Image: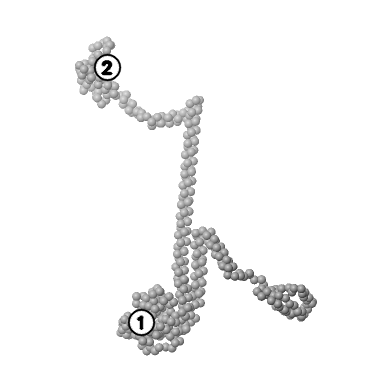
Amino acid sequence: MWTARIVNGFYAGGFRNIHTSQPLSNTGQVVVEPQKDTQNVVPVNDHSSTKVKRKKLKGKRAVVKWLKFFRWKKKKEYERMTAEEKILYKMRKAKRKEERLVEALKKIEPADPSEPTHDPEILTPEEHFYLLKMGHKCKNYVPVGRRGIFQGVILNMHLHWKKHQTLKVIVKTFTPEEVREIAAELARLSGGIVLDIHEENTIIMYRGKNYAQPPTEIMSPKVTLSRKKALDKSKYRDALRAVRRYIPKLHEDLGDLQEQVKREGESKSKATEEAVSNAVDNKIISDCQMKSSEVLDVLEDGNSEPVEDDSLMESSSWSETEDLSDIFETDSDMEVMEKSERPLYLDEVEKFPSNIDEEPKDFEEHLRQIAAASKRFDLSSKDVKLADLDAVDKIFLRASSLLKKRR
């Protein structure tokens, strides 16, 4: 685009870019500027003196690309976090969201909600009973949805009161406490009387004794919200309610995670203590094994070469006798004494008188002589008993009985 301007009394022409609005140098023309007069300086709007701004994204594709990169970067940062850092990040994010929603609700609320005044009429108990019974029977109602109270609800109530004395307002998307608040607000804005709240979701209202349909300004008061703003308010309210339920859950999750980490730390400390104690026990056992091996080496050396240490020999002999006593069943000292005191049958046999002075040539003949001599003595009068006899004595008795049978 060809442009021309006057700079310090000289005519200058050239091309200019419409988007950047930066002057270009004139092709083939040289502009000579005279010496500047410092006294008569006229301010000129020069585009070169403006501040350099951040480069703007050109086109929808560049904006989408930048958004994708930003989301990818946030996603990677979240994946690198630990479990506790993730919970804390969610908590900070939820608290910021709560603050934003509270500010939005404050902005969207009407400027002066206390403008209309309400002075309800006083009803007698009989009138109250009659009107309440009429309100239960009537079928006309006004629904209140998620938007809550706005201009259309008040207008519908007055249109119903044009032909009916009582009216039902059905509220099903709010808690019982919020239903009571809505009933008080409806009575203040419409000028009616609340007779009862049935089943915590149905408000029965009476228009008044001297009711006259008010003008349009009163039927749809300006202090209430419009339909669109009421919907926005309901969205903010629901979001705020969900965030306030979510924050305590995050606190519980954080406490559970900290307790779990504490338990894991205690279990790890116990495991390390057990490992240390096992290592100490293994070391003690290995030391004992090393000492025992050294003692055995010393004993082996002592078998080949005499050792002057008598105490070591006594301990080794004592251990060997103990090992042998464990392997073989040996008789104790008391049993040995009893056996030594017990009389043998052969000693008793020697006491038997024998008429043969010479040594018998046959062993069988000798046994016959012993058996014949035993008949002449009464063994019952002696101290010898069968239970006290030894195995050898029993063999001899068995042999004598066999010889008797052969005869």
Amino acid type, label 1: Asn
Left or right of 29: which side holds 115?
left
Amino acid type, label 2: Glu
Tag nearer the camera, 1 or 2:
1
The first of marks 1 and 2 along the sequence is 1
For mark 1, give the secondary structure. loop
For mark 2, give the secondary structure. helix
Would you say residue 195 is visible in this rendering? no
Find out whether the residues at labels 1 and 2 contact each other: C-beta distance under 8 Å.
no
Question: Which percent across, then down, holds residue 177?
Answer: 40, 74
Q: Is residue 251 above or below residue 305?
A: below
Q: Image quarter for residue 212?
A: bottom left
Looking at the rendered image, the quarter that the C terminus falls into is top left
Would you say residue 210 is visible in this rendering? yes
Question: Residue at left 78%, top 75%?
Answer: 32
Question: Residue at left 25%, top 21%?
Answer: 398
Question: Residue at left 56%, top 67%?
Answer: 64
In the picture of the structure, the residue carrying the numbered disc 1 is 140
Q: Image quarter for residue 188?
A: bottom left
Q: Is residue 189 above or below residue 277?
A: below
Q: Which mark is residue 350?
A: 2
Question: Which percent across, then down, holds residue 381?
Answer: 21, 22
